[in-house]
Amino acid sequence: MDINIEKKRGISPLRRALIEVTFIIFLFYSNLLMGEFTASNGHGKTLLMALINIFTAANFTIAIVAALIGYFVFEYLRKQL
């Protein structure tokens, strides 16, 4: 019985890194957005005002650095386990 079974291709390391870094950035910005609507930041803010406040060059730089650090930490832990 000769059955041709294709191997399931894994996701490339570069694509996986991009997905993981993007997800960490998403979590960072969602956390910032939630912080914009807490009682300490004032009521009456619109979603547009909150988005303008969180999408800054400084926040983007922090998000990228934090995402890369998070990615490398999780890769290290993944290899250790």
Image (spheres, rainbow, N blue to C red):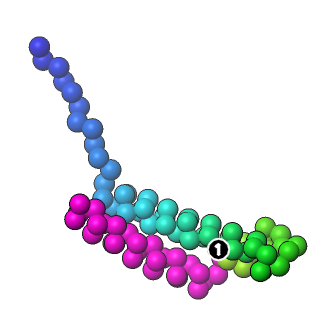
Quadrant holding the N terminus: top left
Question: Looking at the picture, how far across and down is residue 27, in whole percent?
Answer: 55, 66
Q: Nearer the viewer, residue 41 or 20?
A: 41
Which residue has dot 1 on it? 32
x then y, percent, for residue 80: 22, 65
- Based on the displayed image, in which of its 4 quarters is residue 35 positioned? bottom right
Task: Name the dominant secondary structure of the magenta segment.
Answer: helix
The quadrant the C terminus occupies is bottom left
Q: Nearer the viewer, residue 20 or 73?
A: 73
Image quadrant assignment for residue 20: bottom left
Viewed as shown, does residue 61 lie left or right of 69? right
In magenta stretch: residue 3? no
Residue range of the region highlighted in magenta in the rendering: 55-81
Q: Residue furthest top?
A: 1
Q: Measured from the top left, where is residue 25 in percent x and y?
A: 52, 69
Q: Amino acid at mark 1?
A: Leu
Q: Residue at x 79, y 75 (%)?
A: 39
Residue 65 included in the magenta stretch of the image = yes
Disc 1 on helix, strand or loop?
A: helix
Q: Horizontal placement of 12 versus 18: left or right? A: left
Residue 75: quadrant of the picture: bottom left
Residue farthest right in this picture: 44
Residue displayed at 59% across by 81% down: 59
With 36 as the anchor, is 81 left or right in this view? Answer: left
Figure check: 74 above or below 3: below
Q: Using a 10 Å C-alpha cutoff, classify the residue at mark 1 as few (fewer than 14 neighbours), some (14 to 19) or many (20 or more).
A: some
